[in-house]
């Protein structure tokens, strides 16, 4: 107890304390006096937040995966916060337009961003001039979940496994084509990653979206796609496309009999769509912590999980710190893929 007496004496609080109650009161006053003002403000900000509607920017068109996640989670989050939440779709330029807008808003917790980690990490690595930095201009709140990327081929290609495809591609160098939903996006770069890790050559054929590539893939005019599962799942179930592997660490609940690409012949291969919640840099930590807590509860709700898992989106929260580490790691990973593929950055 002697050390405490010395401290209080130095602060001018008391010189002698005999009552346990007075001792506790003095200790509390001293703790308040020594607490930096910034740390004292955060709990108050969190307690008062929110006092008006919250906007969630979704940097993709309405109806897509990011939009659906933002609306599904936002609806339940509104109930917990006691304020309405408005989803603001701002698509364009590989999600960088809406993301840029979110980065520049007032960091008060009233504008948030639901967007992918990997997609934006790729944009960070691919575009030379962005007016935001994903790793430095946002306060990560939480991971929301991820979706499966699947390797699909037309049955007419005549291969039934990843190993058979790799052998076929090596035997037909220069003749294998892979489709993507556009240059510089996740699906394009996933194809490049597969080329590097499997040691095969494939010619990239970009389309303006997955819906545009599907007819050519089903009819065998392109050899393969490694793409987001939902658009391909009906064709897989109908036998119009054959799933060779999923690009994740574990098998997909939607395709339990399909191996991961790693276990099927390309160890360590992984790529996926994902969804995360961000706030602008400078948002009070108390508000970030409050949002993280409430979203974590929302992600455990049975109706939320059922709705999103039905379209192949698996929910998984995280701490803000874990999300920040993931952002940094993914930027480094895809920067290397772009460099090794000798892709010209825009």
Image (cartoon, rainbow, N blue to C red):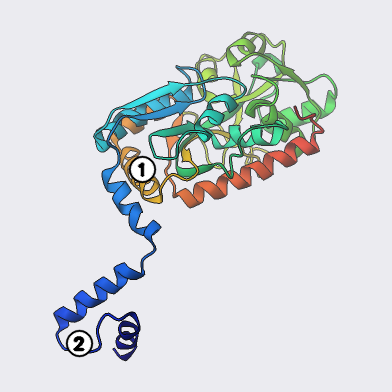
Circle 1 packing at 10 Å, graded few (<14), some (14-19), many (20+), is many
Disc 1 element: helix
Kindly identify which residue carries mark 2.
17
Kindly identify which residue carries mark 1.
291
Disc 2 element: loop
Residue at the image position 36 percent from the left and 70 percent from the top: 34
**Which residue is more in the foreground, 183 or 197?**
183
**Which residue is more in the foreground, 232 or 37?**
37
- The circle drawn on residue 15 is none
Residue at the image position 71 percent from the left and 17 percent from the top: 206
Q: Is residue 14 above or below residue 55?
A: below
Point out the frontmost of discs 1 and 2.
2
Q: Is residue 218 above or below residue 245?
A: above
Mark 1 / mark 2, whichever is N-terminal: 2
Q: Is residue 134 above or below residue 3?
A: above
Residue 15 image position (x, y, % from top left): 25, 88
Q: Determine whether, in the image, residue 309 is placed left or right of residue 240.
A: left
Look at the numbered discs 1 and 2 and tell me whether their residues touch, using CB distance below 8 Å.
Answer: no
Q: Determine whether, in the image, residue 120 is placed left or right of residue 159.
A: left
């Amino acid at each position: 107890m002697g050390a405490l007496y010395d401290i209080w004496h130095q602060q001018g609080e008391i010189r002698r304390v005999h009552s346990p109650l007075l001792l506790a009161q003095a200790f509390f006053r001293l703790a308040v006096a020594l607490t930096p003002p910034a740390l004292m403000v955060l709990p108050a900000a969190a307690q008062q937040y929110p006092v008006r509607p919250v906007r969630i920017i979704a940097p993709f068109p309405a109806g897509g995966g990011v939009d659906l996640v933002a609306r599904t989670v936002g609806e339940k989050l509104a109930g917990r916060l006691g304020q309405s939440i408005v989803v603001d779709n701002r698509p364009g330029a590989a999600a960088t337009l809406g993301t840029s807008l979110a980065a520049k808003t007032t960091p008060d917790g009233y504008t948030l961003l639901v967007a992918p980690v990997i997609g934006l990490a790729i944009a960070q690595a691919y575009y030379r001039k962005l007016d935001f930095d994903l790793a430095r201009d946002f306060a990560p709140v939480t991971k929301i979940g991820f979706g499966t990327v699947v390797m699909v081929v037309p049955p007419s290609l005549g291969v039934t496994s990843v190993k058979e495809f790799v052998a076929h591609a090596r035997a037909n160098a220069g003749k294998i084509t892979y489709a993507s939903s556009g240059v510089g996006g996740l699906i394009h770069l996933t194809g490049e990653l597969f080329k590097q890790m499997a040691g095969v050559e494939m010619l990239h054929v970009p389309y303006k979206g997955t819906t545009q590539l599907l007819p050519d893939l089903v009819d065998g005019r392109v050899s393969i796609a490694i793409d987001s599962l939902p658009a391909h799942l009906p064709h897989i179930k109908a036998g119009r496309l054959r799933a060779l592997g999923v690009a994740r660490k574990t098998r997909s609940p939607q395709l339990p009999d399909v191996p991961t690409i790693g276990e099927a012949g390309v160890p360590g291969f992984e790529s996926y769509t994902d969804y995360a919640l961000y706030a602008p840099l400078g948002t009070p930590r108390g508000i970030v912590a409050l949002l993280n807590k409430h979203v974590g509860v929302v992600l455990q709700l049975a109706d939320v999980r059922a709705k999103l898992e039905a379209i192949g989106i698996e929910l998984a929260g995280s701490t803000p710190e874990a999300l920040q580490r993931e952002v940094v790691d993914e930027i480094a990973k895809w920067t290397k893929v772009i460099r090794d593929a000798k892709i010209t950055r825009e």
